[in-house]
Structures are given as structure tokens and as C-alpha cells.
Image: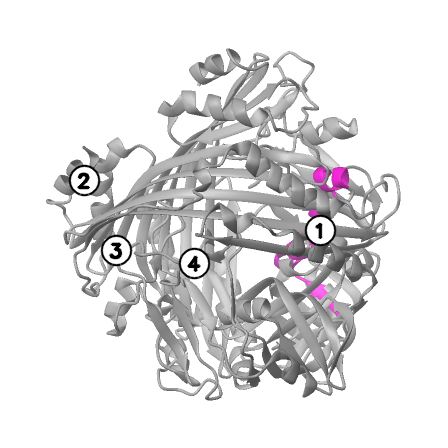
Amino acid sequence: MMEEKVKKALKKVDAEYVEVHLEETEVTSVRYSGKEMDSIGTHFTRGGNVRAFFRGGWGFSSFNDVIRIGEAIQEACQHARQVARDGGGLAPANPLEDRVQVELEDDPREIPLSEKERIARTYNEIILASSKIQTSQVRYVDKFMRRSFYNTEGTALHEERIYCGISFSAIAKDGANIQTSFDSVGGTRGFKTVLGQEGKVERITKEAIDLLKAEKVEGGRYSVIVNPMLAGVFAHEAFGHLSEADHLDENERILKIMELGKRFGSEELSIVDDGTLKGERGSYLYDDEGVPAQKTDLIREGILVGRLHSRETAYKMGEPLTGNGRAINFRHPPIVRMSCTYIEPGEKSFEEMVSEVNEGIYAVDALGGQTQLEMFTFSAGKGYRIKDGKIGPMVRDVILTGNLFETLRNIDAIGNDLQHHGGLGGCGKDGQFPLPVSTGAPHIRIRNVTIGGK
Amino acid sequence: MEKILENAMKKVDGAEVYYEESEERIMRFKSNRLHSINVKETRGVGLRVIHKGRVGFSSSMDLSQANLIVEKATESAQFGQEAKFSFPSAGSGLKPAPKVKVVSDEVRNFPLEKGIEMGKEMIESIQTSNSEIKTDLHIETEVSKTHILNSSGLDLSFENTYFSFFLEGFLIVDGSFLWISEGKGSCRLVHDMKPYVKRILWKADLARKVAPVKTKRMPVLFSPWAMTTLLEAFELGVNGKRIQKGSSPLLNRRGEKVLDDRVTLVDDGTLDYGLGSSPFDGEGIPTQKTVLFEKGILKSYLFDLQTAGMLGEETTGNGERGFGSLPSPGSTNFVLQPGEKSTDELIQAIKEGVIVYDVIGGGQSNLLAGDFSFNVGLGFKIEGGEMVGRVKDVMVSGNVYEAFNQIRGIGKEVEDVFGVFSPPVSFDSLNVASGEK
């Protein structure tokens, strides 16, 4: 029995702390690209790793063949000793035993491949029905995952998760002008997640075509109303990453800027990370260090009050554990990551927010975002001019950039319409991509945002 | 492997088994000190089948699951894409594989102790000269083996070694954060780290002073590192798959002059020790050198077997894949032909402009259409032919298809940036946006 073998192997190790991860996944995907089926099939992964800690140093060894576990424990311990720094430790975590199985009414593993193919084909046909569409991409993915975690402190956890989602993009072309519109849904709620998305598919198709005629936005500084999707990406990319303690634990200068108790925004602004939300893509019960997921306040009423930790960073900084040590798969060690990060809703309606803007931009959806700690850049899928309190014509190439701290202070209205978004992708950090996360926000309004453009 | 092929052939018309195994060793330094040693062993097998004229695929990391992947690949072939190729056989008129060097025994036998020592030395020499800088560093070696076997009788294996390092210096200048990075990746060892350390120090020194920039159009000089972002747009444009889908701006333009006549761009999988080099692509086709643009004229696209088959073209040996995915056209090494000017001459020729070393957010604009827009991560203002200080909170934007028709000068000093071989290039007039009017 594997479990007995692992537990026995962990009884005698040559390091201060050792953990073992075992993982199996089964992924089914269907991808249409234009008129053609691009790929369809089921894929299996299986493997594990050992991570050992000794006086502040880590050794990590991953393998496919579980038979290698004994050797891997020795190797990781030896490497941890080779790295050993000057002490250090891990924040204490309670030993836990649990076994969590997926129980869904519509488990994607029970759905025949033909049905998954049909769903993807149906959405793809909606996009291609429009003559101005050059090509499309529709990608269905379900992923079943079973993870086991053991450590030398007596923790033994088994958690199953199942993700299911679909993404669709429409690409419209007129000569050299090529425009893409994109949306996706994803979470842990089962196969129903991907059903009934016809409205979204029709919307992105129309948007891609409209973008062909949209003017490029003029570069400059604007009052910008940001939609929930893009505001969520902003909270994640620009602020969330700065809350990850592994950026701070050995860098006293960044830490000084991220001092708890500092004011970051108005009293209306609260940002949290919550891995316990039900059904979202970024949710889980236990992180990859065997610590339960939780809700962590990052900014509460404008004041910086918390950050995200692994056991290593929580120890170094003398702060409580938050259950954010996560790895994308068994080939990587857990590092500090977000789960479901969102801006809490405020009081204002979207209509009120727009009516108060004389001249500005309504920035909608996110193509992507990137940060270098305080500096961020992210691009909206599209935008609309706002003039005299009314939404005007569509504009494209809306890329927002700025300094995080300034931008947080410049948030002057927070909407009452919080939405969470999961999708199929995820977050990238230190070569680990994509990690399932969710982002969320209501509409927010920011003064004085720099928009790059013509 | 043979057994998977044998089992598959009992059920389907044609089959290909792609097996890959690798061992990676990564030494990570965090804030000037060694933090972890990671060793990763990975192997897996992908089974591509053609059955009743359609493609099916499945993969697994568990080699004992041979029957399961045969079953899943066969099932998926019911819905799969119509096959527009047949599996190549060794004798079917394939060109001989290039004699490309992609294995280094120094990398294969690289002792961890040596990597640790290398890292410590680099960090120490940075510390000695500038103790303000905090350095993160990772050094990585990889040995990988690939074995491709198909029902047309092809049976080939090859090996690759890789060595890379990435050095990132962090410092605070003027109350704001600054990262300075250097790195290199290739199939062989980098012996002399001093030039990389020297450049980090030089940039840190120059970055002390911030120079204001006005929002307007001006000449912009891209370092080889920053050039990789712009060249990515061409990589998308010449990708056979985008050509087949009709979504590339380069569709139906072969033979046409698209770029400045100083631009010659090549995809070359046969460069000794290049990060993207290999004797064969992921379908067992010998790699080659493909001229994409010659003196500005679009010459060729990049294809794998299926995409080429769909368009009635020949594969260019660019079937890129891992064991877990079907092949798809991908670039190997990108090589932009150098010009005649030194970097100093390029700088001296700019009265007012910006030199960009590092960008943030390069891949987020509509790169497929050639549009780029990014924040300058590390860049300097040029005034009267001299670098006068760092630019802060500045965005540069434009369109590559326009910019590559407005080239001021191409440098002669080519750098290998992780398989993209580019000289520095300066452009006449790009949008530079800052907070200042």
C-alpha cells in the first residue's frame, strides 16, 4: 500500500521537515480553431515529489515513478543540507487528516466525449456564422485531480478537485486590421458551468466585429471606469502579487513600503483573498503545504492589514498562516500564491458612476496584465468613450499603466455589483503557470489613469 | 514504446509514438543566498493515430497505461481533424538530418557544486561593487531524450542538453523599485559570467539618475533583449497555423516587400548549441534553415506536416510539441541579420530619444496585427547622442509592420537572447507616452 510506504519512509528522515506530494490527473480537452477541429483527447499525468527543509534550505525532487520515493527522500534531504543557511524555520501548522472526494451531480468524467465535442462545436458555429469573422477558437477543458499530501508532522490529506470550463475567441479581420474578442467561464461546479453560454458567445462575436471599426484610443490621462472583470485583474496583478510574502520576507526595503497599518486607499476600499468561496476556480480546501484555505483581509477600509503566506514566510515574518502555499503540479514546489482575490462591493450603481464623469473612458475586460511590483500595465479588451455622463463609441488598444499606490489612492468610486471570474487560464509566477485562481470586483472608478495609445 | 505502437496498430490505420524524458537541476538563489536545489525527472508518452482518415491523440506519464492511451486515442479519432499527412518514413525522401551540435558533456555532467560556486561568485562580485543590489538567480541544467517511432517504420532518437541562467538585480532608486536582468540559455555551458555581472553593475549605475521624457514621437533604440518582444509579432505572422486560419497579416504576401530592405530574418534550427536547435522536429522531420524575410521580402512561412498538408505546402521541419500535445508550427531559433553600426554609433545618431533594455507587458497588445504597447522596464533617455538617465513610467507603442519600414539603423553586435539572435535596432519615430505633456 502506497500510503503505508510513504508514512513509513517519513518516520526516519535526515532533515528537519519533509513532505511528500502524490498526484494524478486526467484532462480531457476539445479545441476548435476556425472550421477545423484542432485537437481532442484525454491526457493522464501521474507523479510526485518530496520537499525537505533543513536550517532554512530546501531540497526538492520530483518523479513520475512512485517507486522512486525512497531515493527521492534521500536526495531532497541531502540537497536541503547542502543549501542550509543560518537557521530559519516553518510556522507551526496543526497535523491534519482528511479525505475529500468530488461529489457532483454532473461530474464531467461521466459525460461522453461526443457531448463535449458537441458543446464546443455548437459555440464555434455561432462565432463562424458571422461573415465578418475570419477565424475562431473554442476550447473546452475538464481536469480531474487527486492529490495526496503527507509530512513528517503527521499530516495526511487526500483532496480531489475537478475543474471544468470553456473559452471562446472570435477573430475579425479587415485587411491588416485584425481584432480579437475573448471570454471564458470556469470553476469547480461541474459540467453545467459550460452550458447555456450562447449569449456570451454572441456578444464576443459582435464585439470583435465592432472593434474593426473602433478608433484607437488617444494616449493621455483619463478618469476611467473599470468593469468587474478588468478591476478583478487589477486587484490580482497590481496589488495581489505585492501581498505575496515571498516578495517581502527577505527584502526589508519592499517590506517597508508594504508596512501593515499604512493607508492605501479610501475607507471604501477593501480587498480580500478567499480560498473558501464555493465553486470558484481559485477555491480549494487545503493548500499544498497541508494548511486549510481561509479568507484573508489584505486591505480593510483602506488600511493594509494582511498578506499571504507559506509556512516559510509566515515564520520569517512572525505572522499567522493563511493557507496560500500552492504549486501548479507535482513538478513544482509550493510558493506563495493567491486563491480568489477580490475587491469588496461598495454602494454606487454603475449608472451613477458614469453620470458623474464629464470626459473619460469605460475600460472593459482584460487581455492580460503584468506588473513589476509597484508598476503595472494591463490591457483592456476594449473601451468606450464617456462624455458628459454618457457612454459613447467603442475604442480599442486601451492599455492602462501606472503606479499601484497612486492608482489605489485614486479610486474614487466602488460599485455595488461584485462579480467573480474564473475561466480556463490562471496566474503565472516563477515559471509556474497556469495556477487556477479567480479574480473579482465590482465596477470601480479611478481618476487620472495613464492610457497608452496613439 | 514498441508495445504501444503494436497495440495501437491492432485498432487504427496509422500511429506514432512520441516519448520524452528529461532531468532538470535547478539552483535557486534568493536575495543573495542559495535557497533551494530542485531536481525534476519527467517522462511521458504521446500517441497520435490516424484512423479512417482522422487524427486522434492521447498522452500519459504512466507508461504502464499503454492500453488506456490506445483506447483514448482511438476514441478521440472519431471526432478528430481530417488527416492531411501521412507519417514520414526514414526512406521516404526526407532530407538528411543536419549535423547540429545540441549536446554538451559539460552540461550533462555538470556538478551541482559547480553551479553553486558559479552563483556565489556572481553574487559576490555584484555585492563587492554595489551592495545596494539584491540578487535573485537561478541556474538550470537539463538533459532530455526524445524517441519517435511510427507505423511507417520511422524509429529515431536524439538527445539535447540545455544550460541557462537568469540573474535579476533588485534595487531602489529614487524611492522606486528597479529590476535589472541578464541571462542566457543555450545547449552548452556559459563559462564566463563576468560580462553579465558587469552589465548589471553598469546599468545600476546609469539608473541612479532619472531623466524626464515628454509625450511625443521620437526615435527609439531597442537592445537585443527588448527586440525579442518585437520579433514575436513576426513569429506570429509567419506561423503556418495562422496563415491556414487566415488570421495573419502576412497571408498571401509571399514575394512581396513587406519590410525595410535591410531586414533579413531567418528561422534556423540547425545552429550549433542554439536553444531552439535540434536534429529533428517533433514529427521526426529534419530541422532546417528557413529564410522568412530576405531584404524585406517575405519568403516563407513555418509549417508542420498537418498545416502544410492542409495548404498543399511542404513542412519546414517546425513541428513543435511535447509528449502531451499534438505538433503545431513553432519557431526554432530566430536570427535577425546584423547591420554595420556599433551600439555607440546608434546612440550617437539620436538627438532626442529613448533606448529600451527591458519591457513590461510586451505580450498584451494586439501583436498578431503587429501592434505593440509596453511599459519600459529599464530604459534610458538619449540626449545629444548620449544616455543621460533612466526613464520612468514611460510607455512605448507602435506597429512592427510600420516600424520595420522606418529603421534608422541596425547594429552589428548580435546577442543570443534565449534562442533569439538579434542586434540592437533603432527606429525613426515611435509613440513615447509619459505623464508629462
Along the polypeptide, which appears first: circle 4 or circle 2? 2
How packed mark 4 is, by other alpha carbons closer than 10 Å (few <14, some 14-19, many 20 or more), is: many
Labels 1 & 4 near each other (Cβ < 8 A):
no
* A26 sits left or right of B420 in the view: left
**Above or below, comparing residue B199 to residue A43 in the picture:** below
Residue B345 in the image, given as x and y percentages of width and height: 73, 64
The image position of residue A169, as x and y in percent, is 67, 51
Frontmost of labels 4 and 2 is: 4
The residue stretch that appears in magenta:
B219-245
Is residue B104 something that shows in the picture? no
> Would you name the residue on which mark 2 appears?
A6
State the CA–CA distance, disc 2 to disc 3: 16 Å
Residue indicated by mark 3: A290
| Residue at the spot 67% in from the left edge and 88% down from the top edge | A356
Residue occupying the point 61% across, 71% down: A227
Residue identified by numbered label 4: A282
Who's the residue at 43% across and 52% down the image?
A188
The residue where tag 1 is placed is A170
Residue type, mark 3 in image:
Gly
Type of amino acid under label 1: Ala
Earlier sequence position, callout 2 versus callout 3: 2
**In the image as oriented, which residue stretches furthest toward the front?**
A105
> Which disc is residue B260 wearing?
none
